[in-house]
Image: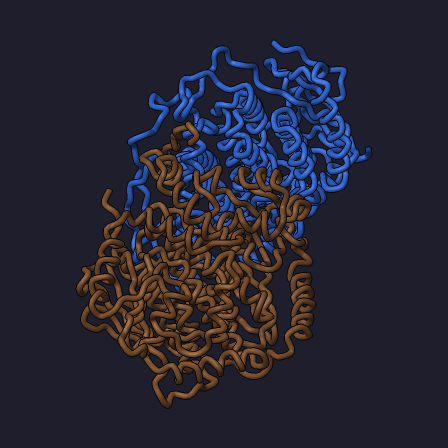
Amino acid sequence: MASIDYDSLIPNNVDLTHNRRLKRALEKWQPAYIEWWKSVGPQVFPTNEIYLRTAVSTEKGGWANFGYVRMPEYRWGIFLADPETDRVIPAGDDAGKPVWQDIPGEYRNVLKRLIVVQADTEPASVEQQRWLASTAPSLYDARNLFQVNVEEGRHLWAMVYLLHAHFGRDGRDEADELLARRAGDEDKPRILDAFNQPCTDWLTFHCFTCFTDRDGKYQLGALAESAFDPLSRTCRFMLTEEAHHLFVGESGMERIIRRSAQLEREAPNGDVRALGGIDLPTIQKWVNYWYSYSLDLFGSEVSTNAADYFASGLKGRWREAKDYEDHSCLGKSKTIAYVEGGALVDRDIPLRNAMNELLREDYASDCARVVRRWNKALKDEGSSVEITLPHPRFFRRQGIYTDAHFNTSGELITEAEWEAKMDDWLPTDDDRAYVDSLMKPVLGQGKFANYIAPPRRGIHGNPVDFEYVRTDG
Amino acid sequence: MAEFAYPPVDFQTDPSRYVHWDLEIDGDIAHLTMHIKEDRPMWDGRYELKLNSYDLGVDIELNDVVQRLRFEHPEVRVVLLGGAYDKIFCAGANIRMLGGSPHAFKVNFCKYTNETRCSIEDATAHSGQTWVAALNGTASGGGYELALACEEIWLIDDGNAAVSLPEVPLLGVLPGTGGLTRITDKRKIRRDMADVFCTKAEGFRARDAKKYGFIDGSFPRSKWTDGIAAHARTVADANAAAWPQRQGAGVALTPIVSTPVDGGWDYRSVQVRIGGDYGDRVATLTMLAPEAGDTPSRDGDTWALRAFRELEDALLHLRVNHLDVGLIQIMTRGSAEALKVHEDAVLDGASSDWFWREVQLHQARTLRRLDNMSKSLFAIIDEGNCFVGTLFELALACDRSYMFLDDDGENTVELTRASDGSFPMATGGNRLDLRFPGDAEAAAAVRDEGGPIDAEAAEDLGLVTMSADDIDWEDEVRIAIEERASLSPDALTGMEQNLRFGGAETCETKIYGRLSAWQNWIFQRPNAVGERGALTMFGDPERPIFDFRRT
């Protein structure tokens, strides 16, 4: 077990104290990070005491220390999961050989790019959500938002550590750039489009946290199978934190859905909106939108880059080492439906070129599991409605389905059919205006906005009406 | 795998048929937008033109744009080259197209695209039409090389967009469209930073690209449109002051019409025949002087423009669609007097009238295409020939020339001022002087001659390789051609390229010379095109394997 250096400015288990160059690089970056946090991080309750979890070690339970913290004083640290002895490269042409502790020169640039793209999403979502707490449906939800925010911040730290430790001057430049780009900024936008739209309502927040952060889980999972061991260890530790974000989104959506079913029952004619709730058809539209948007983040169905990453061992499949026997994937293919001449035609493509699609399928089945839990909640509330996931071809703006139109079952439709049905499937301006109209802060202890059910239990054994945010300072 | 037998390529197009380019002319500024349709490659179904990548079809349209802007839009003073897609300006030549192309096609593709880029520089230098690359997203490989052909390069600074030449690290080949030569010789970039740039697949974003000279400037996204527009205005105003003679309406380029005939095809002033006495490896190209009574006219149909456009088309067809042809006999027919009338219209007009200047420049470019043929060129100067003035440049461009020695000295050639520098080679020099390297007196003696020169005198003056009388003529020509046709085509291509471009180098000669030598060598090597070569493996699920021994 690596010892934790509690005394230093930056809690870590990477022996920062004895790596003066790295320590100096990070200590220089740290003030810039705090400046960034203050200027574009949470703008509501920015210096109030929040009941947050802080990782102080990688030991069992060490990553979950709870207490009141003012966010700018949060101790963002650097933690790598403990090394696995004799770990071997999980995937690609060099599968079975010892993992790399240093980056082979030939992969430095491409690995740096992979890390930068992943890292860029972390500060981006903090920026997207920076005003969201002004309409928090409860203190509990505000606290969950802030927990997600500080952990995105820590994930940025984790990635910046890798850039500083392994990528030389280029890495330091990239670390600086991560603080220079801004979500939605015309001149310095974040790299991925999904991370440039502001998040202004809590239905969107919970969809984003459930679906888009889940993309992060799978990307981290693929990087956890990397031949570059420090990246693998970093991502393995991040995955444990990511689980909380997913819990926030999944349970947040469930609470909105559950509340919708309750209001449907209470309203004389089932008109949920009349009682100030979010009706299930509207929720379904948000699901359609964010699920398909998140599918885009996996990249094109057929990708030479994905094949290269796999071949060179930079990324593996989800649970590559545990779940697969053949780690080369040569001589195998995957059938992908292409749009050709107005019809879907199956084509076999080499399996390595389909790595994005494989990861997307793992993601999709995880999402399906989540939706089954929501439907169980709906059934418990006596509703006959079910939430469904649209087909992965629906409303895609990346990959091979971009230029065609599909219905939610994945069948090809004409542009006219799309135009006619689009408003039934995706949020309209009216829907957004309605959801926005519900966004009013509810800040009393134990109080919740009408459109969302209280959680079953509070955080870390505390009651639901616990003072998760000290609103008076 | 059998080599792909590609269908014949058609080099003619016009704006009504453009698929991949949007051209909008706004007063003196032309907005040319690269807008490539990925599902419209030149060879249907073989590859997709993703990420604004291009193939020969795209470049044939671009070449047409360059030509037409010069002739049809003299009012245009700036050409703003941009891309239609967000984030990516152009990813360069389509790699799957290159990977699936026969070697000869790859070479011809590179040569043609280079000629298009040189014509962009020619337009900037000689027509007062400054090309400005406005890179609204990443320009990689051939995308950046296209930008390098422009006078200025501006790159959007959005934290993502970059310029790059990733050929070496990603594909195991070279940036073959002048990229390496232009960064050192045109943009004068330090060789160590050029080395870093060319091995860094992701390239440089605006800050570093500007710092080391890979771009001229940048604007953030919010100031991009206005910034580029204001800059274009400045350049356009400067050009208006510098090129006052470019006034008046444009002149439409007329369609080039060719007619298939037995054993070849005909244009109005150019005839091509393949086969005949020497078999399919020899072609005969005959250029016809203007007919008697055909007077020069200031339009697209005038002989000096039309005939050279026909010659250009014939040369391109011979290059790309007739790979078996290894030797071209070049002949001429017609009246010296008519030829000189048309030549005078061009050379007299060029000093004051932009149209005639453009005709002259086009003739020069076409002659440079002739210099760049990777086929042996023999001038056959027989009775009835019209190797006079401008057309004598054809003979000077040939590797050898054979002249029929008649009894009464009526078979003659004649030089005019056309050989005094009107049609410079890629080296910048003119063909007559370069014919006599280190011997200025020999060239002066030719110029002193004046008037028609018979075969005996021509041989004495060094203007022809050999003259032969009626007893020897047929045999000498036959043997020379048969001998030539028996030699290794590869060795001949290399030898001819060496011998044709004696003297000083320019950016342009380096581009073609190094394409012929280095790139074509690399394109043949197992490390690029072997079973596990980088180009072969690109896009495949397996990685390349190199033979690391250096030559």
Residue B475, placed above or below residue B105: below
Chain shown blue: that is A
Q: Is residue B205 left or right of residue B146?
A: right
Residue A68's image quarter? top right
Residue for point 39% across, 25% down:
A93
Q: Is residue A125 left or right of residue B64?
A: right
Give whichever of B454, A20 is nearer the camera. Answer: B454
Residue B253, placed above or below residue B394: below
- Horizontal and vertical percent position of residue B144: 53, 51
Residue A237's image quarter? top right
**Residue A312 appears anywhere in the view:** yes
- Quadrant in which the N terminus of chain A appears: top right
Looking at the image, which residue sits at the far right? A473
Residue B86, placed above or below residue B79: above
- Quadrant in which the C terminus of chain A appears: top right
Give whichever of B77, A297 is nearer the camera. Answer: B77
Q: How many marks?
A: 0
Give whichever of B182, A466 is nearer the camera. Answer: B182
- Horizontal and vertical percent position of residue B23: 51, 69
Colour scheme used in the picture? by chain
Residue B219's image quarter? bottom right
Residue B49, placed above or below residue A77: below
The color chain B is rendered in: brown
Q: Is residue B197 left or right of residue A75?
A: left
Give whichever of A137, B536 is nearer the camera. Answer: B536
**Residue A147 appears anywhere in the view:** no
- Horizontal and vertical percent position of residue A56: 67, 18
Residue for point 22% across, 58% down:
B479
Residue for point 64% across, 36% down:
A174
- Horizontal and vertical percent position of residue B44: 31, 57
